[in-house]
Image (cartoon, coloured by chain):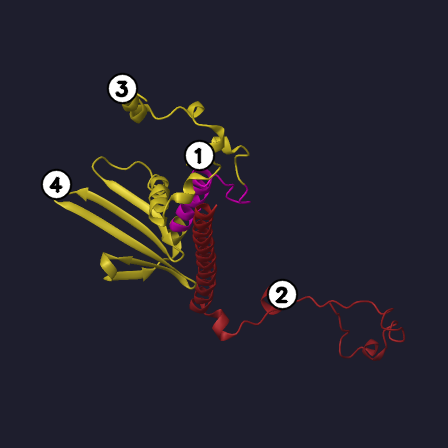
Chain colours: A red, B yellow
Amino acid sequence: MVIYPPNNSRARFEQPKWANQTTEQQPMQYEAISPTEQYTYTAGEMDNNTLEAAQEISEAAIEAARDKAQVKFIMANTESICAWRKLAQSQ
Amino acid sequence: MPTLLQQAMSLLVGDQPNRQPASKKTTTRPLKKLTDRQLIKLESEIGRTLFGEIPTGRTREFFCLDNDTWIWHEEWKDDAGQQKSQTVRYEVHPNGILKVEDGGKNYNFLKGQELMNLALATRMYHERVMRELYKRDPKTGALLTAEPSTIPQVHE
């Protein structure tokens, strides 16, 4: 947290002792930010319905990807069986 | 000249393998002479067992027809003794599995649990048919038996 001197203090006009140091030598300054100030939600993000909709889209995408994988798996099994059936007849 | 009794016994119990001259034995695999239809029938004997016990009086078939189609077929008699049957065709498309029922009147793409169940059934079908019928390792395709004698041979 940065603590500023009172407005009427001379200290306000005094340079901090690290002012002439290089950037690397200067101490880190931390500003205390309350959790509510860390991120400003937009109106849409604050809307619960929007959040739920986003979650639904995500779940639907996962399910679609899972279904796609199952279809590929069935296709592979089908092609394999038919190929071995042909091979069994030819050998 | 074999007697009539010997001929009848031969028909009943078959020829003893040691009676066949070794030169007439072939290593031809038995499945070579089977048609697609016959192989599918053999596959279906395995396929029909994948879904548990079949109720008495009901027949079931489940098999891979070709590169694009799986068939589920059941027949039974209802309480009035009427013969009933149900055939479901699963069409394999790159964008999904189309389930076709009632001769094409009802159709929809499988998804979710039903699709997963079919995937599981095809996997079990593949594994068991490969092992039990084609005598191959389902993953590598390697012949499971090194000795041809363990596979029934065709005598020509």
Question: How far from the left and from the top, in percent, is residue B155?
Answer: 42, 34
In front: label 4 or label 3: 3
Residues in magenta?
B118-142
Host chain of mark 2: A
Question: Farthest residue toward the left?
Answer: B80
Q: Mark 2 points at which residue?
A: A34
Separation of marks 1 and 2 at Cα, in angstroms: 83 Å
In front: label 3 or label 2: 3
Q: Which mark is residue B153?
A: 1
Q: Name the residue under label 3.
A: B5
Crowd tier of the residue under label 1, counting other residues whose Cα lies within 10 Å: few below 14, some 14–19, many 20 or above: some
Q: Which amino acid does label 4 sit on?
A: Asp
Question: How far from the left and from the top, in percent, is residue B25?
Answer: 47, 33
Callout 1 touching callout 2 (CB < 8 Å): no
Crowd tier of the residue under label 3, counting other residues whose Cα lies within 10 Å: few below 14, some 14–19, many 20 or above: few
Same subunit under labels 3 and 2? no
Task: Tell me the SS state at disc 1.
Answer: loop
